[in-house]
Image (cartoon, helix red, strand yellow):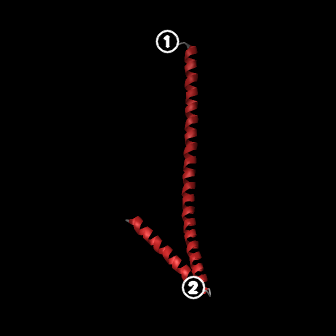
Amino acid sequence: MQISENEFEELQAKVQTMLEALSRTREGITLLKNENNALKEEIAHLNKLIRIQKNSIKDLEENLKSKKIANLLSKKDKTSAKHTLNSLIDEVERCIKLVHAMSN
């Protein structure tokens, strides 16, 4: 079976169109891979920042508790200070019980 020159040119044009589409698809894939890598790096950076901020928050909370305790101890009203310290101790004990319950 022979094809005409016109049919051959049509097939050649279709093949050329498909090759161009394939090339554009490959370029798109490359761009998406690069964007994906950049996003992965950004996620890693943000996760690191989150860990740093969580640690900062913990440090600030501990500092605040220390200042509250120091403030209580400097108060003239010792009964109020004792009551607040007892409340803090109770809170710590509840937290310890929760940690033990979660670890079992």
Q: Nearer the viewer, residue 79 or 39?
A: 79
Residue 79 is marked as 2
Question: Where is residue 53 shown, x and y percent of the image?
Answer: 58, 65
On the image, which quarter does residue 63 sit in? bottom right
Image: 15 above or below 65 = above
Residue 24 against residue 2 in the figure, above or below? below
**The C terminus lies in quadrant:** bottom left
Q: Residue at x 43, y 68 (%)?
A: 99
Callout 1 secondary element: loop
- The quadrant holding residue 25 is top right
Amino acid type, callout 1: Gln
- Tell me how far mark 2 sits from mark 1, CA to CA: 108 Å
- Please name which of the two marks, 2 or 1, marks the residue nearer to the observer: 2
In the picture, measured across the screen, residue 93 lies left or right of residue 43, that is left
Residue 23 position by quadrant? top right
- Expressed as whole percent of the image width and height from the top left, the position of residue 101 reads 40, 66
Q: Is residue 45 above or below residue 11?
A: below
Q: Earlier in the sequence, mark 2 or mark 1?
A: 1
Q: Which residue is mark 1?
A: 2
**Residue beneath the point at 58% across and 72% down:** 60
Structural crowding at the residue carrying mark 1, measured as other residues with C-alpha within 10 Å and reported as few (<14), some (14–19) or many (≥20): few
Pinpoint residue 19: horizontal percent, then vertical percent: 55, 30
Q: Give the residue type that dot 2 points to.
A: Thr
The residue drawn where x is 55% and y is 70% is 58
In the image, residue 34 sits, relative to residue 13, either above or below, namely below
Residue 84 percent coordinates (x, y): 56, 79
Query: 13 or 104: nearer the eye?
Result: 104
The secondary element bearing badge 2 is classed as: helix
Q: Nearer the viewer, residue 80 or 3?
A: 80
Q: Look at 51% across and 79% down and name the residue there.
A: 86
Q: Nearer the viewer, residue 103 or 77?
A: 77
